[in-house]
Image (tube, rainbow, N blue to C red):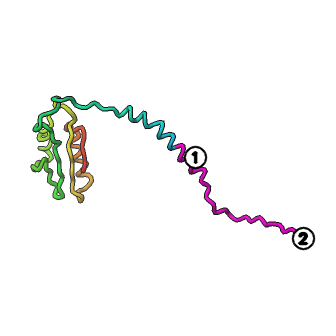
Amino acid sequence: MSRRRRRHSNRASSAINITPLGDVSLSLLLGFLVITPIIIETMATTLPQDGSGVAAGAVRQDPIVVLTSEGQILLNGKEVTEQELPGELNELLPPGMEGERKVMFTGAGDIAYRDVMRLLDVMRTNGVEAIGIR
């Protein structure tokens, strides 16, 4: 009887090694299990007490500045010039007001970038602390 020798092939194995996947999954699971109680403790909030809120009509609305494609500046729907804008903003957002001086800004899509930046700079230099862009 002759014995046949098996030939070892040098072909790559097509089996997927899932050990690294299991290691990473378990590490992530343990990390989340450790961090979750810490996150829950730091997210504690203080709810407002009864009667400490603002009156129903006293909610402040942030001014909305719109730069149209024709170059017009609209402040809450009213047309103003670039020179009038600081005065109008100071009426809506007086310097001694409580809270942050915020303005919402919207511009048409075909306006030159320099025009938008110039208007944002005018608002920023005249005391606007935060500008929301939509």
- Please determine whether, in this image, residue 62 is positioned above or below residue 109: above
| Most common secondary structure along the magenta stretch | loop
Q: In the image, which residues are magenta?
A: 1-27
Q: Mark 1 points at which residue?
A: 23
Tell me, yes or no, if residue 130 can be seen here.
Answer: yes
Q: Where is residue 93 in the image (x, y as percent from the top left)?
A: 15, 37
Tell which residue pokes out farthest to the front in this image. 1
Position of residue 6 relative to residue 27, above or below, is below
Residue 1 appears left or right of 79: right
Residue at left offset 66%, top offset 62%: 13
In the rendered image, which quarter is residue 111 located in?
bottom left
Q: How far apart are marks 2 and 1 (CA)?
A: 49 Å
Instruction: Assign a secondary structure to mark 2.
Output: loop
Amino acid type indicated by mark 2: Met
Name the residue type under label 1: Asp
Instruction: Please give the name of the residue rendered at 25% of the width and 40% of the height, measured from the top-left corner.
Output: 130
The picture places residue 116, in percent across and down from the top left corner, at 24, 51
Q: Is mark 1 on a helix, strand or loop?
A: helix
Whole-percent x and y of residue 63? 16, 43
